[in-house]
Image (cartoon, helix red, strand yellow):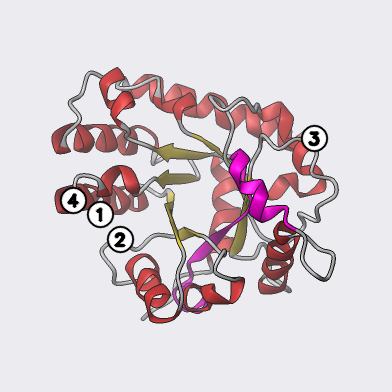
Amino acid sequence: MSALEPFGARLRRAMDERGPLCVGIDPHASLLAEWGLNDDVAGLERFSRTVVEAVADRVAVLKPQSAFFERFGSRGVAVLEASVAEARAAGALVVMDAKRGDIGSTMAAYAESFLHKDAPLFSDALTVSPYLGYGSLAPAVELARESGAGLFVLALTSNPEGGEVQHAVRSDGRNVGTTMLAHLAAENAGEQPLGSFGAVVGATLGDLSTYDLDINGPLLAPGIGAQGATPADLPRVFGPAVRNVVPNVSRGVLRHGPDAVALRDASERFAEEIRQAVTSS
């Protein structure tokens, strides 16, 4: 398997050239309806293709949420495969938002589904859940390194339920979220210009100054737009690590469809607002 340049290096270049924006592809039923599309495979395909054609040649990252494709069975997964391939061909990096997490051979199979270079759903990075223990992610970490891909590990998520796990205090006095960040910092040690193993950290969490977010890796930050956070909030939330933040916007861009020009304009506005917020901090 011929490895790509490491994900972290490719991501750093994409963010510097295209702006630090990740656009989610979340074709849930209500959004399909807003676009005047049926909640079926044809509507799914039209939605996904429109988003990819509109923005994949200008944004740094696209993040399809696999569940919204999987609910249509094999035909939905085929649409996802095509969307991933077309987005990558247009120059966008693809983060597959699948949040996989398991142990042993099952975790290895999940990794092969999304991180093996020859897999139909090969993506530049994959979101994963470490809550069977960080060590359970070892097969994904190993395959990501081999293929030049990356991971985004759930660390400090914005959903209120997450706190009961992520804020739980371990016997060594550290909470679980801090422990996950420390694992990622170790994975990224010495990598230049950016490590390939990132954390998912919600942009709606407010002051995170008690956490060391300097993991030498990217921070995927959902919550910009419809969830209430704004680009101007990023320096306050992420502090010195803000330059490595990959803010995710989904509905804030997608609600402008199905007009491709409006989708492009919205993505460019967000990218510029984020760029200004990051560079002025």
Q: Which mark is residue 73?
A: 4
**Amino acid at circle 2:** Leu
The amino acid type of the residue labelled 4 equals Gly
Chain-order first, disc 4 or disc 1: 4
Q: What crowding class fits label 3: few (fewer than 14 Cα within 10 Å), some (14-19), or many (20 or more)?
A: some
Give the alpha-carbon distance from disc 2 to disc 3, as whole Å: 36 Å
Give the residues drawn in magenta, as a range. 141-168
Cα distance, mark 4 to mark 3?
42 Å
The picture places residue 268, in percent across and down from the top left corner, at: 51, 28
Q: Return the mark for residue 34.
A: none
Residue 81 has which mark?
Answer: 1
Is label 1 in contact with label 2 (beta carbons under 8 Å)? Answer: yes
Marked residue nearer the N-terminal end (3 or 1): 1
- For label 1, the crowd category at 10 Å Cα-Cα, with few meaning under 14, some 14 to 19 and many 20 or more, is some
Quadrant for the N terminus in the image = bottom left
Q: Is residue 130 visible?
A: yes
Q: Earlier in the sequence, mark 4 or mark 3?
A: 4
Q: What residue does disc 3 label?
A: 236
Residue 58 appears in the rendering: no
Question: Distance from label 3 to label 1 (Cα)?
Answer: 37 Å
| Residue occupied by mark 2 | 121
